[in-house]
Image (tube, rainbow, N blue to C red):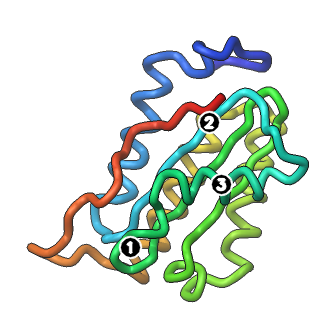
Amino acid sequence: MRIFPFKRKEIFSEEEKNRLVQAIRVAERLTSGEIRLFVESHCSYVNPMDRAKEAFLSLGMEKTKQRNGVLVYVAIKDRQFAILGDQGIHDKVGDDFWIKAAELLRSHFQRTHIVEGIEECIGEIGSSLRTFFPHEADDDVNQLPDDIVFGR
């Protein structure tokens, strides 16, 4: 596992990237929901949630059929993050879910368990998505890519 600081191109090793993409795929396997991971070195906004909202829209995440996309945004060097769920999922899970997910991520980050924290957070998000937005047999397609998006 790597510890801060990271070079921009080397935020995660290939193995770590593969683990995170696999976590997204597993989390989405039994749900119609969509999870994206957006990672960059620095957050150019005072509030990382503002950057997450910008990234959410730029990735077209508000266009999912059931408005059930979730973005996990991480600014590695700034040690900031935000978790943003679209209206469909937010209406189902409420504020408490996002607070608990943020606490989970924060606890891992404080111990510099970055990849493990993101993996576990994605797993929790996937579990909620499966509960409220189960896989829809033949009609369910992966609406958004599972790859990690690297920002500035």
What residue sits right under mark 1 in the picture? Answer: 130
Q: Nearer the viewer, mark 1 or mark 2?
A: 2
- What separation in Å lies between label 1 and label 2 (alpha carbons)? 24 Å
**Which of disc 2 and disc 1 is earlier in sequence?**
2
What residue sits right under mark 2 in the picture? Answer: 39
**Location of residue 101 in the rendering, given as x and y in whole percent from the top left corner:** 68, 62
**Which of disc 3 and disc 1 is earlier in sequence?**
3
- Quarter in which the N terminus is drawn: top right
Q: Nearer the viewer, mark 3 or mark 2?
A: 3
What residue sits right under mark 3 in the picture? Answer: 54
Give residue 135's quadrant in the image: bottom left
- What separation in Å lies between label 3 and label 2 (alpha carbons)? 13 Å
Q: What residue is drawn where x is 53% and y is 63%? A: 70
- What separation in Å lies between label 1 and label 3 (alpha carbons)? 26 Å
Mark 2 neighbour density, 10 Å: few (under 14) some (14–19) many (20 or more)? many
- Give the amino acid type for the residue marked by disc 2 in the picture: Val
Q: Is residue 117 above or below residue 2?
A: below
Relative to residue 10, is residue 25 drawn left or right?
A: left
Q: What residue is drawn where x is 71% and y is 15%? A: 6
**Which of disc 2 and disc 3 is earlier in sequence?**
2
Instruction: State the residue lying farthest toward the left.
Output: 138
Q: Is residue 146 above or below residue 114?
A: below
Give residue 22's quadrant in the image: top left
Q: What residue is drawn where x is 69% and y is 12%? A: 7
